Amino acid sequence: MVKMIRLAVLGCAAIAGLAASQNSAQAAVVFSDTFDGETLGLNYNSFANWDVVANTGTVDLIGAPNFFNLYPGNGRYVDLDGSTNNAGVLATKASFAAGSYVLSFELGGNRRIGSADGVTVKLGDFTQSFTLNPLDPLSLIVLNVTTSIAGKLSFENTGGDNVGAILDDVTLTAVPEPSTLALASMGLVIGMVARRRRNQA
């Protein structure tokens, strides 16, 4: 009986260790972009990590030092409605697997005219929309995202009046799947019990 209790304690400790290692291994940043390494320009489509999806319109890359620097102190950022009266869809070049993520980004108003902007965020089959008034500050948004299919991360500005919502500092972090951890933990305990029984035989 004492031996079985010791085995159970060892099993719990091993599961806790496995949980910690899986959390540290899987809770990892899989994508990050501040846009500060890009070249300023209107109707910009030379991003290192993004495409402006063909036939959907344009976006502008604006900001510091003095190119439509609407949010001083924030480097460079994307105006999601370019200069062609047709807002573009900004989508990552990379595709991301089905799973759970934490998505963070900064979104702000266009700072220039009286109309509001709508922005739709997509990743796989996850979709969420936001409405921003022109004077809304550049604010951090954090979303828990779960998608059942692989896909690209995208931001789409509704409308087409050459002034869109402002996007900056996008980060996507993968988070551990509880089901994976549970299965691995169960397998570890079963293996320890079977090994103990073989040793006692």
Image (cartoon, rainbow, N blue to C red):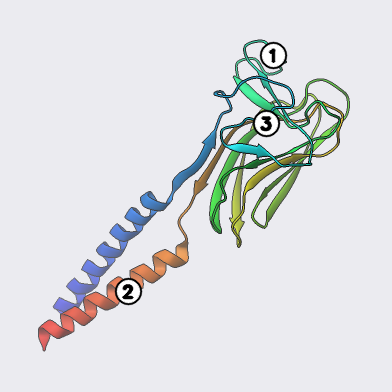
Residue positioned 78% across, 25% down in the render: 110
Q: Residue furthest left?
A: 200
Q: Percent x, y for residue 139?
A: 66, 30
Q: Nearer the viewer, mark 1 or mark 2?
A: 1
C-alpha distance separating marks 1 and 2:
58 Å
Give the total number of marks visible in the rendering: 3
| Residue, disc 3 | 45
Is mark 1 in CB contact (under 8 Å) with mark 3? no
User: Nearer the observer, disc 2 or disc 3?
Assistant: 3
The one nearer the camera, 101 or 19, is: 101
Q: x%, y% of residue 181? A: 40, 64
What is the crowding at mark 3: few (fewer than 14 residues within 10 Å), some, or many (at least 20)?
some
Q: Quadrant of residue 121?
A: top right
Callout 3 secondary element: loop
Query: Which x, y percent locates residue 155?
Result: 70, 41
Which element is circle 1 on?
loop
| Structural crowding at the residue carrying mark 2, measured as other residues with C-alpha within 10 Å and reported as few (<14), some (14–19) or many (≥20) | few
Earlier-in-chain disc, 1 versus 2: 1
- In space, the residues marked 1 and 3 are separated at their CA atoms by 17 Å
Can you say which quadrant of the picture contains the C terminus?
bottom left
Mark closest to the chain's N terminus, 1 or 3: 3
Residues at discs 1 and 2 in contact (Cβ within 8 Å)? no
* Residue type, label 2: Gly
* Residue under pointer 1: 67
Which residue is painted at 59% across and 57% down in the image?
A: 150
